[in-house]
Image: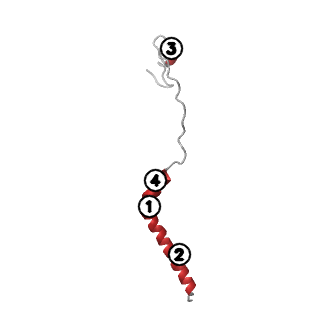
Amino acid sequence: MCLSRFAWISIAGVVALTLFLAAAAYAFRENLVLFSLNPRTPYQTYRLPPKPEYGEADAWAALPERQGLEEALPVGVQA
């Protein structure tokens, strides 16, 4: 089966376009990677919580004069 002249030109055009796109992708590979890594939206921003007042007892998880769970052991662990 012989292909027509139009078929050969179409196949050659598709091959040429594929080679051109592959060469362009290879030439711009670093830019394509950087473009794909760009998040395109700003990172989430938020307000920092207020600094704790370390002079107050509520700012501490454990204090020597307060009974708490700081001396507790997990279930099944013996001291």
Q: Which residue is mark 2?
A: 14
Q: Marks 3 and 2, Cα distance to the nearest angstrom? A: 76 Å
Q: Marks 1 and 3, Cα distance to the nearest angstrom? A: 60 Å
Q: Which residue is mark 4?
A: 34
Amino acid type indicated by mark 4: Leu
Number of other residues with Cα within 10 Å of mark 2, as a class: few under 14, some 14 to 19, many 20 or more = few
Q: Which one is closest to the eye, mark 2 or mark 1?
A: 1
Could you say whether the residue bearing mark 4 is in a helix, strand or loop? helix
Residue 47 in percent (x, y) is at 54, 30
Residue 35 in percent (x, y) is at 48, 54
Number of other residues with Cα within 10 Å of mark 1, as a class: few under 14, some 14 to 19, many 20 or more = few
From this view, report whether residue 71 is shown above or below residue 13: above
Number of other residues with Cα within 10 Å of mark 4, as a class: few under 14, some 14 to 19, many 20 or more = few
Q: Marks 1 and 4, Cα distance to the nearest angstrom? A: 10 Å
Residue at 48% across, 51% down: 37
Q: Which residue is mark 1?
A: 28
Could you say whether the residue bearing mark 2 is in a helix, strand or loop? helix
Which residue is at the front of the view, 77 or 1?
1
Residue 6 in percent (x, y) is at 57, 84
Amino acid type indicated by mark 2: Val
Label 1 vs 4, first from the N-terminus? 1
Which residue is at the front of the view, 70 or 12?
12
Q: Marks 2 and 1, Cα distance to the nearest angstrom? A: 21 Å
Residue at 46% across, 55% down: 33
Q: Are marks 1 and 4 in contact (CB under 8 Å)?
A: no
Q: Are marks 2 and 1 in contact (CB under 8 Å)?
A: no
Amino acid type indicated by mark 3: Ala
Q: Which residue is mark 3?
A: 57
